[in-house]
Image (cartoon, rainbow, N blue to C red):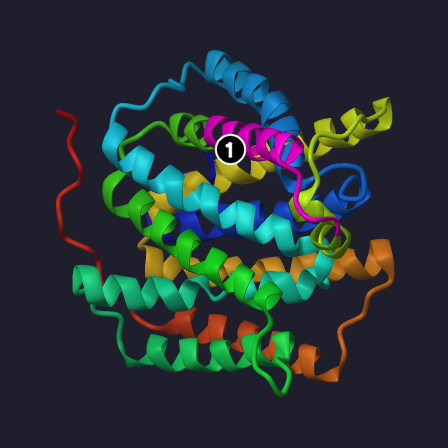
Amino acid sequence: MLLEKFTPATRGALLLITGISIFGFSDNLTMLVSDQVSVGQFHFSRSLIAMFMVFGLGRAFGLSVIPKYWKPILIRTFFMVTSMLLYFGVMPMMPIAEAGAGLFTSPIFVLIFSTIFFKERIGWRRIVAVIIGSCGVLLVLQPGANGFTVYQIMPMMAGACYALGSIITYRYLREESPLAILMSFIVSIGLCGFLITTLLTVFPIAPGLVEQAPFLFKGWQSVDSSFWLWMFIIAALATTALSLMTRAYQLTQTSYAAIFEYAYLISVGLFSWLFWGIIPNYLSAVGIFLIIFAGVIIVLAPQKPVEEPLYTAV
């Protein structure tokens, strides 16, 4: 294969950039259905379609969709599902680029968690790069005089959860089937979406909250055929992107690979402009530039390999 010529770190970076750019495109398509359903119904519907796609890929390529390493799979899935529920829940209530900037505090959390929990040596260049990237994120989010709103905090919480899931993928699931990791996530987030939406239908939230954040608090809604068409497209794109990203984190040290996820801000901003005519203001543009600059620094910084053993099944 063409990618076999490159080192694992380079292959991981290329796969991650491709996958995250696809996500930037598909996340903009979410806005086409967010006024029809809640975040729970959205994830349930998308997962319902994606499960069959992943199962078909497994049969076609002879890859297992059943995990070998259940404990790290379950822990990773918990963090990833929480991350995506928080992120998608807030997406219709703020510009996608701003929500994405909050989510992509994840590389900062990756470095913090890797240093605290795993004693990973990240080097001063990456520390400087993360500080620069953090300043860029602040410029994109532009908190008001009273600090961050709850809606701005939600994508940052998603970033912390995403970072933990990414670390677990690299450290304990490098030998796991990428489709098994993906299927675990899809089934779990679909089940959570079903349960959340059912609870909101049986026990409705106060009308004021529903009016303020309908994508978060609506119960089950009836949908038409156009909804399912868009969901099929979104599910296909998400399945492709998640497959590429999962494999990328199996190949590449998390604190190195995470910086390439900043490509999402370029992708989501570009398609947000093309689809919806949303153009970042001056401060946001400067922030995005700082984030990209931070990525260049980290790419050029030397990478220290991780020596700890892989997780083994029992």
Q: Residue at x 36, y 61 (%)?
A: 256
Q: Would residue 60 be counted in the magenta stretch?
A: no
Vertical comparison of 38 with 150: above or below: above
Question: Does 119 sit left or right of 33 as displayed?
Answer: left
Question: Does 41 sit left or right of 225 as displayed?
Answer: left
Vertical comparison of 2 with 314: above or below: below
Q: Residue at x 58, y 33 (%)?
A: 199
Q: Position of residue 280 (x, y in %)?
A: 76, 73
Quadrant of the rendered image containing residue 99? bottom right
Q: Position of residue 55 (x, y in %)?
A: 51, 16
Q: Residue furthest bottom?
A: 145
Q: Would residue 187 be counted in the magenta stretch?
A: yes
| Residue tagged 1 | 192
Tell me the quarter of the image containing the N terminus.
top left
Q: Position of residue 164 (x, y in %)?
A: 34, 53
Q: How many marks?
A: 1
Q: Which residues are magenta?
A: 186-207
Vertical comparison of 42 with 48: above or below: below
Q: Residue at x 14, y 53 (%)?
A: 307
Question: Is the stretch drawn in magenta largely helix, strand or loop?
Answer: helix
What's the residue type where badge 1 is placed?
Answer: Cys
Residue in the foreground of this view, choosing between 75 and 130: 75
Tell me the quarter of the image containing the C terminus.
top left
In the rendered image, is residue 7 in sight?
no
Q: Residues within 10 Å of mark 1 (few under 14, many from 20)?
A: some
Q: Residue furthest top?
A: 59
Q: Position of residue 72 (x, y in %)?
A: 26, 37
In the rendered image, is residue 71 in sight?
yes
Residue at disc 1, secondary structure: helix
